[in-house]
Image (cartoon, helix red, strand yellow):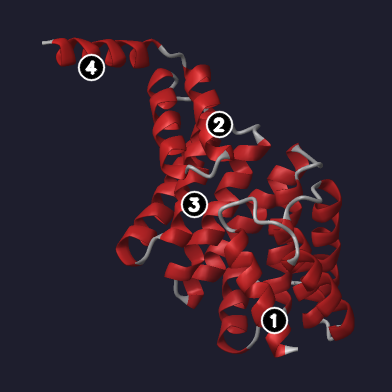
Amino acid sequence: MKTLAILLLITSLAFAQSASEWKKKGDSFEASGKTKQALAAYENGLKKSPNNSEILVKIAKQYGDMMPSLGGVAKKKAGRKSLEYSRKAVAANPKSSDSHLAVALSLGKNTEFMGNKEKLKASREMKAEADTALRLNPKSDYAHHMLGRWHQEMADIRGASRLIAKVIYGSVPKGSFQEALEHFNAARKINKRRLIHQIEYGRTLAMMGRDAEAKTEIQKGLNMPNREADDGEAKARGRKTLNEI
């Protein structure tokens, strides 16, 4: 009976927490890299405030952050959940830069499960969402990053993918390594702590044939401490590029 009473007390206390209190708990877990605990806290917050775009964005992010540690069906499911909640965030608050950015990021994370045609369709939406995010918040480093990735990929498009892109976009997308470089540079100026901006800046230099500069800039990124869930993947891309130069 005593154990049951304690459980009921804990449940009642949890129920009493407000959405903002649950979000604060989630933020604390997220900062400590405890993605599952953060997700649980944000989900509790969402129950209190179902149309809270900030919490919806956070939930989308947790599912995306889980992906590197998952495999197969579980990874794909997490990717779908990330996109689902990011779209809900936009529906809840179309004027939120973070909501539109969440869609762009989630689309990017889901491309590994797509064929070439589907990837290119997603890339069109990803760019539109990143453009909107940057318009709503010119200081969004990740919006610059996503636009950099778009230019990076479109500048390198070739073969059958180029023909598919012409059909989807109406013409061959004008991706530019120089514009990619400028977006990554803007991103790293806004947020110097995110190594992903630094590494992609270096990788773009490598794509432009500026190997000596690329090595220096990528190494700077590799020397930075991991702070976010996808930093390991970013460093793996950086090392791969260094090995190919």
**Sequence-first disc among 3 and 2:** 2
Q: Which quarter of the picture shows residue 219?
A: bottom right
Classify 10 Å Cα crowding around label 3: few (below 14), some (14-19), many (20 and above): many
Q: As displayed, is residue 60 above or below residue 15?
A: below
In the picture, measured across the screen, residue 69 lies left or right of residue 61, that is left
Which element type, helix, strand or loop, lies under badge 3? helix
Which element type, helix, strand or loop, lies under badge 4? helix
Residue 176 in view here: no
The residue at 19%/10% (across/down) is 5
Residue with the mark numbered 4 = 7
Which element type, helix, strand or loop, lies under badge 2? helix
**Sequence-first disc among 1 and 3:** 3
Q: Nearer the viewer, residue 64 or 218?
A: 218
Which element type, helix, strand or loop, lies under badge 1? helix
In the picture, measured across the screen, residue 241 lies left or right of residue 13, that is right
Q: As displayed, is residue 110 above or below residue 214?
A: above
Mark 4 residue type: Leu
Q: What is the CA distance from the residue labelled 1 to the residue labelled 3?
A: 24 Å
Residue farthest to the left, as pictured? 1
Residue with the mark numbered 2 = 28
Mark 2 residue type: Ser
